[in-house]
C-alpha cells in the first residue's frame, strides 16, 4: 500500500470526510482491521482564505508547496490536495516536489465520462466557478461546463465560507442550493459537480434527481485506487 500525503485544513470539515472515506474504502476492499497508510498536513485555513480574497495566489501556493515538501520528506508516495479551489496553484506545488499530485478535476472528469454525461453544472467557490483553472481541465476532457448566474454564485460562495466551512449545515441553505441545481438543470446540465469539498455536507443525492458528482468522495476514492495500485 502506498503512503498517501494529504494537504488538508481547507476546511478541516471536509478534510475529516477525506480521512473517513479513504479509511472506509480501504477497509471495504481489504477487510479485517485494514486502514489507509496516510499522512495529513493540515494548514491554517484563515491564512489561505486571506490569500484567496486578497488575490495573493503566489503566497497561497508557497504555503501549500511547503506542506507538500514536508509530506514528501516524510515518505508520502503521492499528494492529495483536499480542496478544489487550491488546485489553481497545483503547478506551483508540483514544481517543488518529485512525487505526483492526484488532481481532483481529473478524477472527477473520469467519473463524469463513465456516466456518459457531457454537460454538467458546477457549484463551488466563486474562484472555482468563475476562473478558468478548473473548468478548462474538465473541458479538455470533452465535458461542457455551465455555472450559475452572478447572484447565485455569490450565494453559493457565501454559504460555503460563512456556513459549511464553519460546520453549519442549514436546511434553508439546502433549499437555496436545490434551486440553483434546478436552474442549472433547466439550462441544460445533465449532471452536477459538487465542486467544493464542503458541499457534500449539505447536498446529497436524495436531494435531487440529477446525478451528483461529489468531488471530495471521488477524489478520496481515487486516492485509494492509487494507493492500492488499482
Image (cartoon, rainbow, N blue to C red):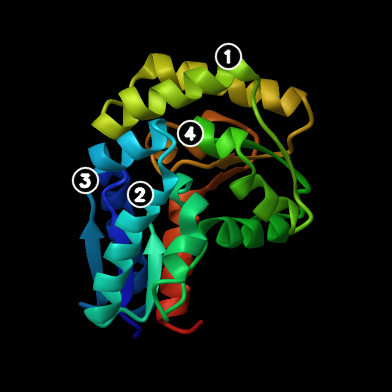
Looking at marks 3 and 1 on the same chain, the residue that comes earlier in the sequence is marked by 3
Left or right: where 205 falls relative to 133: left
Q: Which residue is mark 2?
A: 59
Q: Earlier in the sequence, mark 3 or mark 4?
A: 3
Residue 151 circle label? 1
Determine whether the residue tagged by mark 2 lies in a helix, strand or loop. helix
- How far apart, in angstroms, are the residues tagged by discs 4 and 1? 13 Å
Residue indicated by mark 3: 44
**Image location of residue 102, percent across then percent down:** 48, 68
The residue pinned by badge 4 equals 125
Give the number of the mark in front: 2 or 4: 2
Residues at circles 3 and 4 in contact by the CB criterion of under 8 Å: no
Whole-percent x, y for residue 65 in the image = 35, 63
- Sooner in the amino-acid sequence: mark 2 or mark 4: 2
**Disc assigned to residue 50:** none
**Relative side of 74 to 175, left or right:** left
Q: CA distance from mark 3 to mark 2?
A: 13 Å
Lateral position of residue 105 relative to residue 146, left or right: left
Amino acid at each position: 500500500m502506498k503512503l498517501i500525503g494529504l494537504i488538508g485544513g481547507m476546511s478541516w470539515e471536509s478534510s475529516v470526510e477525506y480521512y473517513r472515506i479513504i479509511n472506509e474504502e480501504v477497509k471495504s476492499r481489504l477487510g479485517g482491521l485494514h486502514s489507509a497508510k496516510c499522512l495529513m498536513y493540515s494548514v491554517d485555513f484563515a491564512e489561505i482564505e486571506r490569500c484567496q480574497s486578497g488575490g495573493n495566489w503566489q503566497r497561497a501556493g508557497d504555503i501549500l508547496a511547503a506542506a507538500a515538501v514536508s509530506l514528501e520528506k516524510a515518505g508520502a508516495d503521492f499528494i492529495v490536495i483536499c480542496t478544489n479551489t487550491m488546485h489553481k496553484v497545483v503547478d506551483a506545488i508540483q514544481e517543488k516536489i518529485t512525487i505526483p499530485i492526484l488532481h481532483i478535476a481529473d478524477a472527477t472528469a473520469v467519473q463524469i465520462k463513465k456516466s456518459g454525461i457531457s454537460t454538467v453544472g458546477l457549484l463551488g467557490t466563486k474562484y472555482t466557478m468563475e476562473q478558468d483553472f478548473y473548468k478548462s481541465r474538465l473541458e479538455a476532457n470533452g465535458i461542457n461546463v455551465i455555472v450559475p448566474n452572478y447572484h447565485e454564485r455569490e450565494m453559493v460562495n457565501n454559504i460555503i465560507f460563512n456556513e459549511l466551512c464553519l460546520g453549519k449545515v442549514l436546511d434553508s441553505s439546502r433549499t437555496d442550493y436545490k434551486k440553483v441545481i434546478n436552474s442549472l438543470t433547466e439550462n441544460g446540465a445533465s449532471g452536477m459537480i459538487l465542486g467544493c469539498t464542503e458541499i457534500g455536507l449539505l447536498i446529497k443525492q436524495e436531494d435531487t434527481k440529477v446525478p451528483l458528482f461529489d468531488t471530495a468522495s471521488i477524489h478520496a476514492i481515487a486516492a485509494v485506487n492509487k494507493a492500492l495500485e488499482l
